[in-house]
Image: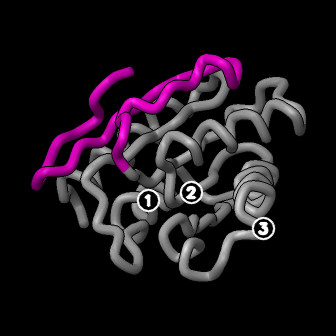
Amino acid sequence: MRVIAESQGRIYISVEIERPDEFASPFPGALFPCLIWYHGSRFGAEERSALARALLEGGCRYAVCGGVRCKDWHDAVDSEFVKNHMDDPDEALDEVHVMTTWHENESADDVGFFFVLHTNFDFHDFDRYLVLHVGRGREVEHVDAAVRKYALGEEV
């Protein structure tokens, strides 16, 4: 775990994992958006579901999915949300609502811009942001640099 940036009371953390059981929320008790950047390791549907469940239980309220097969990650988060809240009354759903987007074939810079500047919604004004790298890949530094650039207001 490393700090990418701190600015205006917000902190941006980067975490790399190779397996779902390696994930633990760096923000216990806090809500946060998460940029899931998939580097194409061997995560199947069960592993994606397990990680999506852990993210939601850990406080993720916006999942921005980028990298290889990012739509699969988007769908896993949506499916886990539905499984866990299918029978909840509407009032309860408002409190736990999760937004998701996927950014197929988009650059790290474009996804970083969206993640930093467009993930607050409704009553959520986040001050903790997680960049979660799933698997190993060359793009780790590019993704983190893009998030840093927009978090610090460089070239915006």
The quarter holding residue 82 reads bottom right
Whether tag 1 and tag 2 are in contact, CB under 8 A, the answer is yes
Q: In the image, is residue 2 part of the stretch drawn in magenta?
A: yes
Q: Is residue 156 above or below residue 69?
A: below
Q: Nearer the viewer, mark 2 or mark 3?
A: 3
- Distance CA(mark 3)–CA(mark 1): 27 Å
Mark 3 / mark 1, whichever is N-terminal: 3
Residue drawn at x 34%, y 76% is 123
As helix, strand or loop, the secondary structure at mark 3 comes to loop
Residue that carries the numbered disc 2 in the rendered image: 64
Residue at (41, 76) in percent of width and height: 121
- The first of marks 2 and 3 along the sequence is 2
Q: Is residue 80 visible to the viewer in this orientation of the structure?
A: yes
Q: 29 above or below 3?
A: below
Q: Residue at x 67, y 45 (%)?
A: 67
Magenta residue span = 1-30
Q: Is residue 70 visible?
A: no
Q: Amino acid at mark 3?
A: Met
Q: Which residue is identified by label 1?
A: 115
Which numbered disc covers residue 86? 3
Measured as percent of width and height from the top left, residue 2 is found at 33, 23
